[in-house]
Amino acid sequence: MISTLEKEITFRFLKARKKDGFLNVISIFSFIGISLGVAVLIIVMSVMNGFRTELINKIVGFNSHVTVKPYSNSIDETKINKNNKLKSISKNIIFSNSGEAIILKNKNTKGIVLRGYKQNDLSNLEVLTNEKFKGDLSLFDENLISIGSELSFSLNLEIGDELTLMSPSGVQTIIGSMPKQKTFIVNSIFNSGLAEFDNNIAFIELNVLEEFFGYDPNERNLEIYLKNPNNIESQKLIVKQVFDDEFVISWADMNSSLFSALKVERNVMFIILSLIIIVAAFNIISGLTILVKNKTRDIAILKSIGVLNKSIIKIFFLVGVIIGTSATIFGIFLGVTFSIYIENFRNFLSSVFNISLFPEEIYFLSKMPSEINPTSIILISVCSIIITILVSIFPAFKAARLDPIKSLKYE
């Protein structure tokens, strides 16, 4: 417990005095350093969480959450209708197939991945129903194709233009096997927000795709879109139990290396930026050490009137902890405020300095993402306060070891 005397002396030592000018400067810089360190950590973590969430949303919005691929036999559709647990977690379940082809347009060639869906299933694809989609899916026959915005830009294609696709599956002629070619009309243009998808993937009708590549309809994949794609591992197990004879893969499996890299990057950034707090916290040691030196006479008088060593330790320990804790709280306020209004700050800086911060054409995001994670804030706060506590211990014990006789000898 902390006595009333210890509290009064602690707050008296915290008050600014003219003769303690240099000490006050160190205390101020300690406070500012810790506050900025905490704030920067929260801002960076919030932006990285925002990027991760945006990336997940775009990947999940473009790809199925769980894909079931048959090994030898076709997927048994009766399993879908009979399993109530599968129905409860899924939003849409549709069949699909895919293959690689080459686009021939104006003497240009480009490899592309074709995805095939039945016409009545196309409206279940988020990328073909968002606000950036251009075109009409109500008439999607065997001669129509939907391409990405980046592909339409690179090949100068608009809705209504024709393009030729060449399939690796050959057609037997009198002179041998010839690559199969088919002309399609651009029916629509989608925009997923990720250049890699928009530049390399196109959609055509499922039966047309299978005929174009010579696929067996029994080899179709099953795409499952979940109601809650974030809780993927537990729901993937449910799908595996239903389709125990097929290969089951989730969106997290297909992008595991990307999200592992993001996780490593976030952890490294946390460690690097934590050094700001550590450096600022060491200023507390300097400040408390100078405070002990300046208050040598006061400490000696306190000891001479019977104040115990443990009380002296508490007093100087509390001084350091109060500076660190108040700086941490102020840093949290700064960091959270900046994270909430980061887009406003970006627009303000862009207008003042006439520069483009976070250009949309590079990042494919209309605004700077930010997602405040309470767990991250608690972790940052706890780490900051623990560092403050640790650096306050040494000066506090040093103050308690002062000999009052030697201290008052030359006073």
Image (spheres, rainbow, N blue to C red):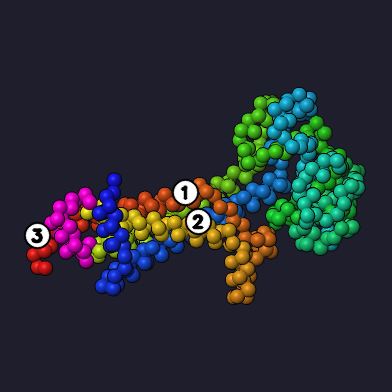
User: In terms of depth relative to the viewer, which is nearer, 112 or 321?
Assistant: 321
Residue at the spot 38% in from the left edge and 63% down from the top edge: 31
Residue at 22% from the left image edge and 62% from the top image edge: 292
Residue 308 among magenta residues:
yes
- Identify the mark at residue 42; answer none if there is no mark: 2
Image position of 397 (left or right of 92): left
Q: Earlier in the sequence, mark 1 or mark 2?
A: 2
What's the residue at 49%, 51% (across, down)? 377
Question: Dot 3 corresponds to which residue?
Answer: 405
- Image marks 1 and 2: residues in contact by CB distance under 8 Å: no
Q: Residue 272, how many percent across, how many down?
A: 44, 57
The answer for how far apart the CA atoms under marks 1 and 3 are is: 46 Å
Magenta residues, start to end: 292-311
Q: Disc 1 vs disc 3: which is toward the camera?
A: 3
- For label 2, the SS is helix
Please check the rendered image and state whether residue 359 is part of the magenta-colored stretch, yes or no.
no
Looking at numbered disc 1 in the image, what kind of residue is underneath it?
Ile
Mark with earlier residue (1, 3):
1
Q: Amino acid at mark 2?
A: Ile
What secondary structure is found at the residue carrying circle 1? Answer: helix
Q: Earlier in the sequence, mark 3 or mark 2?
A: 2
Q: Which quadrant of the view contains residue 247?
A: top right
Residue 125 locus on image (x, y percent): 77, 45
Q: Indicate the secondary structure of the residue bearing disc 3.
A: helix
Residue 74, given in percent of the width and then of the height, sits at: 77, 28
Q: CA distance from mark 3 to mark 2?
A: 49 Å
Of circles 3 and 2, which is in front? 3
**Front position in the image: 85 or 315:** 315
> Residue beneath label 1, please?
378
Q: Is residue 196 left or right of residue 336?
A: right
